[in-house]
Image (cartoon, grey):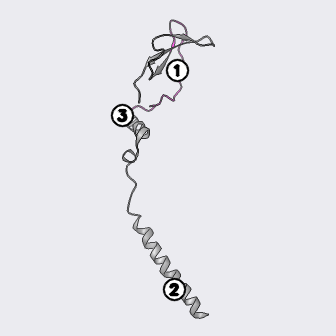
Amino acid sequence: MASLCRQIIRANAVRSALLSTARRGYADKMMPDPLEHATGLEKKELLAMQSGNDDPFNMKVLKKAAGTRDQPTLVPSCFDARIDHPRRCECGHWYKLTEKAPL
């Protein structure tokens, strides 16, 4: 019984020593810079934020203008359709799409 306990204790000590050195070996490595790690749309977003564009996807609320036919609320759009033609909404406000470069 005593020899069995000794074997269990020795096996646990050896296993914990091996695992702790393996865990410690990976502690020196750091994650790469987020810009180097990012790809696709996330990378485009980070590059736009670095260049000073804090709202690359136009998620912020637009400032509402007078909303009349003479002074419509300007809405930026990446698409060609309906640009330069003010339109009236069901609520009575006027909106006009303006060109914006795509991300």
Q: Which residues are magenta?
A: 52-73
Q: Mark 2, residues whose alpha carbon is within 10 Å: few (<14), some, or many (≥20)?
A: few
Q: Earlier in the sequence, mark 2 or mark 3?
A: 2
Q: Which residue is depicted at the point 41% across and 27% down?
A: 102
Q: Mark 1, residues whose alpha carbon is within 10 Å: few (<14), some, or many (≥20)?
A: few
Q: In the shown orientation, is residue 94 left or right of residue 98?
A: right
Is the residue under label 1 in contact with that under label 2 (CB below 8 Å)? no
Secondary element under disc 2, as helix, strand or loop, is helix
- Label 3 sits on residue: 51
Q: Which residue is depicted at the point 45% across and 68% down?
A: 23
Secondary element under disc 3, as helix, strand or loop, is loop
Q: CA distance from mark 2 to mark 3?
A: 59 Å
Residue that protrudes farthest toward the bottom in the picture: 2
Displayed quadrant of residue 67 = top right
- Label 2 sits on residue: 10
- Label 1 sits on residue: 63
- The quarter of the image holding the N terminus is bottom right
Q: Amino acid at mark 3?
A: Ser
Q: Nearer the viewer, mark 2 or mark 1?
A: 2
Q: Where residue 63 sits in the image (x, y, percent)?
A: 52, 20
Seen in the picture, residue 67 relative to 42 is either above or below; the reply is above
Residue that protrudes farthest toward the right in the picture: 91
Q: Which residue is depicted at the point 38% across and 63% down?
A: 28
- Depth check, front residue: 26 or 50: 26
Q: CA distance from mark 3 to mark 1?
A: 23 Å
Q: Amino acid at mark 1?
A: Lys
Q: Earlier in the sequence, mark 3 or mark 1?
A: 3
